[in-house]
Amino acid sequence: MASSSKPEKIYDVFLSFRGVDLRNNFIGHLYQALHRIGIYTFRDNEELKKGDQISPVLMKAIEESYIAIIVFSVNYASSRWCLEEVAKIIECKEEKNLIVLPVFYKVDPREVRGCRKSYQRALAKHESKFGKDSEKVKRWKEALSDAGKLSGWHLNDGDESELIQEIVEKISTYLAQTPLHVAKHPVGIDSRVAKLKSMLNLESDDGVLMVGIWGQGGIGKTSLAKALYNVIFRKFEGSCFLENVRETSEGTKSLVTLQEILLNDILLPKQRLEVSNVDRGIQLIQRRLGRKKVLLILDDADDLRQLNTLAEGKWFGNGSRIIITTRNKHLLDCHQIDQDHVYKVEALDDSQAHDLLTKHALQTHQIRIDLVDSALNYAKGLPLALEVLGSLLCGTTEDVWESTLMKLSRIPDKKINNVLKVSYDGLDENEKEIFLHIACFFNGRTREYTKKVLDSCDLLTVVGFDTLIKRSLIRFELGILKVHNLIQAMGKDIVNQECRDDPGRRSRLWLYDDVANVLSHDMGDCAIKAIVLELPEPIEMHISPEAFTKMRRLRLLILHNVQDSFQGPICLPNELRWFEWSGCTHQIPEFSAGPKKLVGLDMSKGNITGVLKQFKDFQNLKYATFSYCEGLVRIPDLSYTPNLKKLDFRDCKNLVEVHKSLAYHDKLQVLIFSGCYELSAFPNELKSKNIQILNFTNCTKFERFPDIPHKLEALNILSLDRTAIKELPTSIENLTSLKLMYLNRCKNLVSLPSSIYKLQNLGELEVSGCTNLVGFPKYEDLADPCMKTGLSKLYRLDLSNCNLSEVEFFENLSCFPLLESFILEGNNIIALPSSINKRDHLSFLYVGSCHHLQKIPELPAFLNFFADHCESLQKNEDLSSIHQLVGKSLADGLDTHQISL
């Protein structure tokens, strides 16, 4: 059967509350806090609760939410609509995996679950109206009892803002765990998920249960595991889906990386946990997860070593479930998973197979039944084969069906690889080249990176990606390129069949032995187009000086963790388009004389002291990375590389000087110097008209920002955090497209130019921790009668922990008209400007630790205002001009100084 139609989850959070009690205080603050960080929350309005019947809109909203927060207040049970909501919420908790989190707002949880005090009185009134034996009232009581037993929060006289922050963090943690993409057409999934759920015995928290999902490649094990994960993962304290365990444990990432993913996905720590070795990873898993109820799915495991380092049941807390998908049933037996907990995935039955094929084939006209039957007979119910075959035949005519099926019939071995090979054979040469590159090298890489590399090799990547996606050969998930392991194996097999005995006669190499064989001595004329060798640890390899000279077809060369023995200078062919040698321990290899076609160059983490000597010949170079090259001291003349788009020198700790040519590159878009602690010599002017990102973060000796003599209409992001600059030039106004500017912790910064008001596209300005900044420029100092508004798009201004004593600049309503967030924490200000209550967009104002602050003007009711640790403000007795809610909070002498409107 096809997957059932399930309601889409629209809302992140549904808020259930008694409006008259909480709408304008606690709920309003909670709603705004959730809204600020992008959590889509349903909060009803009063119109939905008029009349005798609860609005269907509310019922639908509950069904379409991931999480429900029930705020139980004193009068909650007096509302029939609130009781209907809680009953519906508990129903959805059981039937639709809705997460339910109660907040007991100035009521004891025992009052709710035991229907005592105000809840008892309210229910008695309902019984008098509907009858003591009313099923409706009984349902309400049961729902209150169930909800009152749930773990949540209890607030009596504590700090509401702290509770709100705790709730927001909890919600964020839940929402960080999102459902997985299962399949475009998940045919036959639901019944299998139901069977697996029964095997998992989710109602029991006794011990740890392990289940195996076993079946041949392409049978749909991964899709089934993902669908199961989506249905049950919210029942656990943490969850992790480890995809492609076999491939990852064999590649550059290794088992250590899988252990890191497991820990970080389940714990969701603020700072990512790192694992130094496998044994250390096992200890961390046992210690950090030993008391947690977790869901762990290991997809495509094939070695007992993987299970022994990732999935021992005794490492996890009671109630945990571990699910392993594999082609190897013996692996499950060795891991002592009993037969009752091994689910064998069978092929689709005829009805399901027909449904899946037709969904992917998308025929607009009738195809003969015998042709459809022949296609189904060929695929034998294998989901991957049906998907690829259906995509291959999508929208074609009967004669194409007949010809394709006839072609398939001539293939002697009717296995999955043959089905997939048909899809490859139908590609044009451009798409074939792209597919083989992806299958051999780029599975799991980002779309952006892969596109840049393949474009450099003169391939038409955009149309190639589109064709390959339509043929179901590749897919993208959140910008990451994904290829099913069987399709990848098919692509690699195509390359190996070019010549199984001689790697030098193959078009692509990716295995260490093959690469070492080819590079260790002077080869004759060979067919190699690309070499990509990414090793998990540094390995020394003997590379012949003449190894590359006869590789006339070589376009792509990527070596990671390859340390050469350097018998002499290595000469690279001029036809090379993309070259990466991360961790190269010696000088940059040389090129033959004459023009070079290199587009991408990455020598990061290399022990090099200078860049390419023949830069004048690199007319096509677009991307150059020298990050972490600690021996690099200066950048030479780059005027001979007119096509440069990106230069990355991050963490070149000893880089001192940048050649003036860099400031005039017309095509340069990204320039990164973050972590170049010694950088001090930079061109006096910047004229790169296409520069988009400029990053000097942590350039602690960088004192002078260049002048901008002409308008630069492309620069969007400028980061000068923790630099030594004292001021910005007046010409900063020429960065007309600037959206984000960061000047945090610039300890030497003493002033900002008034021309900053001309940055009409600036959205965020952060000037935090600039302790020598005593004032912010005034709009009045800018003599420009043509300008009516200053910083017209600024929505966030952070001036925290500077040395400001006044904020008169904020009085002028012609400035910052769209400002939403204003942070003044840790300054010396005495008073806030009266114009604040006229700023309609301002929703967040933080003046915490402003110890001299004495006066607050009247504030708008919608403003979230925080003033913790403002001792002088607390002592001030003249509260007449302050908004009544703030004034009351101050007059009552809050234990904490935090005020939230």
Image (cartoon, rainbow, N blue to C red):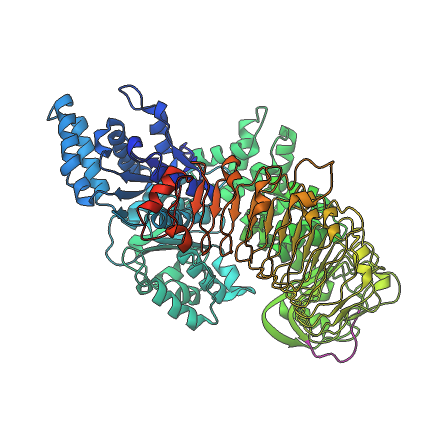
634 left or right of 853 in image: right
Residue 369's spot in the image, x, y percent? 53, 27
Q: Nearer the viewer, residue 122 or 650?
A: 122
> Quick one: quadrant of the C terminus?
top left
How many numbered circles are shown?
A: 0
Instruction: From this view, report whether residue 708 is shown above or below residue 703.
Output: above
Q: Is residue 463 above or below residue 58?
A: below
Q: Position of residue 525 (x, y in %)?
A: 80, 66
Residue extending farthest left: 132
Q: Say which quarter of the image contains residue 129.
A: top left
Give the dominant element type of the magenta stretch: helix, strand or loop: loop
Do we see residue 427 in this rendering?
Answer: no
Residue 664 visible in this rendered orientation of the protein: yes
Residue 239 belongs to magenta span: no
Chain part drawn in magenta: 564-571
In this view, the residue in front, 450 or 19, is 19
Q: Residue at x 42, y 72 (%)?
A: 280
Residue 242, compared with residue 658, is above or below; it is above
